[in-house]
Image (spheres, coloured by chain):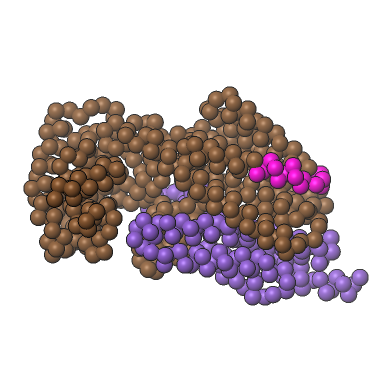
Amino acid sequence: MAHAQGAVGGSPLYRLAPDHAAAAILLLLVALLVVRLVRGPGARSRSPLELLLFTLVAGSAAVHAGLAVGDDHGGAANALFALDALLLALVARRVWRGEPVGRLGAAVLLGSIVAYCASALRGDAPDQLGLLTKTAEILALAIVAQRPLGAAPRRLRSAAVGAAVVLLVVGTAASAWIGAFRASAATHDEVAGHHVHGGAVAPPGTVLPVVPERDATAGERQAVTQFVLTARAALARYADPAVAAADGYRVDGMRGIDFHAPNPSYEKDGRVFDPERPETLVYALAPDGRPVLMGALFQMPELGQAGPTIGGPLTVWHAHEQVCFSLVPPALAGLVSPFGMCPLGSIALPRSGEMIHLWLVPGAPVPFGDLDEAWKRAYLAKLVAAD
Amino acid sequence: MNAPRTLEQLLDVVRALVLLQGAILVAATIEALIWGSAFGGGAATAVPSAAAAAALLVARANVGNERRWARRVLFVVEGALIATIAIDGALALLITRALPPATALVTRLLIPLAVIALLRRARAAAAAAPLAAAAA
């Protein structure tokens, strides 16, 4: 069910995939039905744990039934969704009747979770409905495995179940990350700045605009060339980080091949997309340790303000979303996780302003947009070898 | 339904929910370590998540043993989770006029609220247990 091919925009990791709408509607209907059942006379003889387990499994069955009808992943996948829905419904029925669900319940839930992880590892982009369903299934599995309903808990069993649930959650989160990034990598060339269209998947944390599917005009190419030449001439002095630091760029602690040195005084200076005053410089440390000015990052001063697309499809601005920012110590702390968490003590910034990278290094395959990491490494290695 | 059984049943639900939360915080800790190494932030941002995960998993194992500290630990961690989603939710509404992702609402609002409500009900059931025993 991980298979959302989200349109350009944000990553499906933080959204409901359009082809999962039917499943979401069915889930809501079943939720209403469950609420009625749980409030009815039949629920009085059930324990809170049984009612929770029934709700979780019935909800998952509803989602899988919805996917069997509304998902567009072909006959085999839809048949598997239908089978999963059937088995989950069977487990839910057993729970409601007060019958033991033990091995069947554990096997069905585990199978559903493992299948989801395998699907994500294959590169299907996970979405919110899938992740919510897996959260419910993991919780249901924890209940089923915690102890046979009505039996006494045992410390060893409890510890084993705890370890298994931690492994499942970590495995599901890792699979979701891999799936989300692989899905975007599959369309990487298209979102690199040339041919972004409605079928591309944004990587987690990045929001891409919809760009008309056309080539740049001669005028747009000319504008880009002029901008790049102006920027190269103006920014050449920042090859020396000391000069950049003197102008206000924060170059301390330089590391890696994608070090961003911001200049806070340029962020609200009223000059937008000025080739001589980028808001951030991008450096890389070459294998021999020397800093290399790779490019610059231009940022729009206000949220929601679109960047100027002087090069049409050659100048694709992007924004970031669901970024975790640690308060103590103040630092970028990652992206909101598939389970909706930032590291505790940090806050999630839902959206940044628009920004665009300009690459200054000679021979860069694209002037604007995303520069391939392998290309950067090869360039730096060549630079060192040349000396 | 007698009071001791009700108490134990409520605590069963708490244990399951807290286990899930603890596991999610373990995953968040690992993610924080990975992001920390990628962004140069180090391991510092992972410490609160790791501490909360450990606190939840230890409290889960002790919540039924009439240990008040376990309940207090749960109240503190759940309160912290609710506080952070309240800030994130306010930011999301302010900046994007949308709610945070559904998983965040479930894992950081719905489940913590459920745990707190269940713990309060369990406390009431525990208070009623001696009376029920006396009446029997």
Q: Give coordinates of residue A188: x percent, y percent.
A: 34, 36
Classify residue A155 as left or right of residue A222: right
Residue in view at x 8 percent, y 48 percent: A233
Hey, which residue is sitting farthest top in the picture? A75
Q: Is residue A161 left or right of residue A289?
A: right
Quarter location, residue A224: top left
Query: x%, y% of residue A317?
Result: 27, 42
Between B57 and A55, the residue placed more toward the observer is B57
Q: Nearer the viewer, residue A170 or B126?
A: A170
Picture layout, residue A252 above or below residue A177: below
**What secondary structure is the magenta-colored segment mainly?**
helix
Left or right: A126, with B132 as reference point: left
Q: Quadrant of the N terminus of chain B?
A: bottom right
Who's the residue at 81% across and 66% down the image? B3
Tell me if residue A250 is in the magenta stretch: no
**Which quadrant of the figure has residue A163?**
bottom right
Q: Which residues are magenta?
A: A96-110
Which chain is the one coloured brown? Answer: A
Task: Say if residue A379 shows up in the picture.
Answer: yes
Estimate the x, y position of residue A149 in percent, counting from the top left: 78, 53
Query: Which of the 4 quarters of the picture holds residue A261?
Result: bottom left
- The residue sitting at 19% across, 56% down in the picture is A291
Query: Can you see residue A301?
Result: no
Residue drawn at 49 percent across, 36 percent down:
A122
Residue A101 picture location, percent across and down: 77, 45
What shade has chain B been given?
purple
What count of labels does the image hold?
Answer: 0
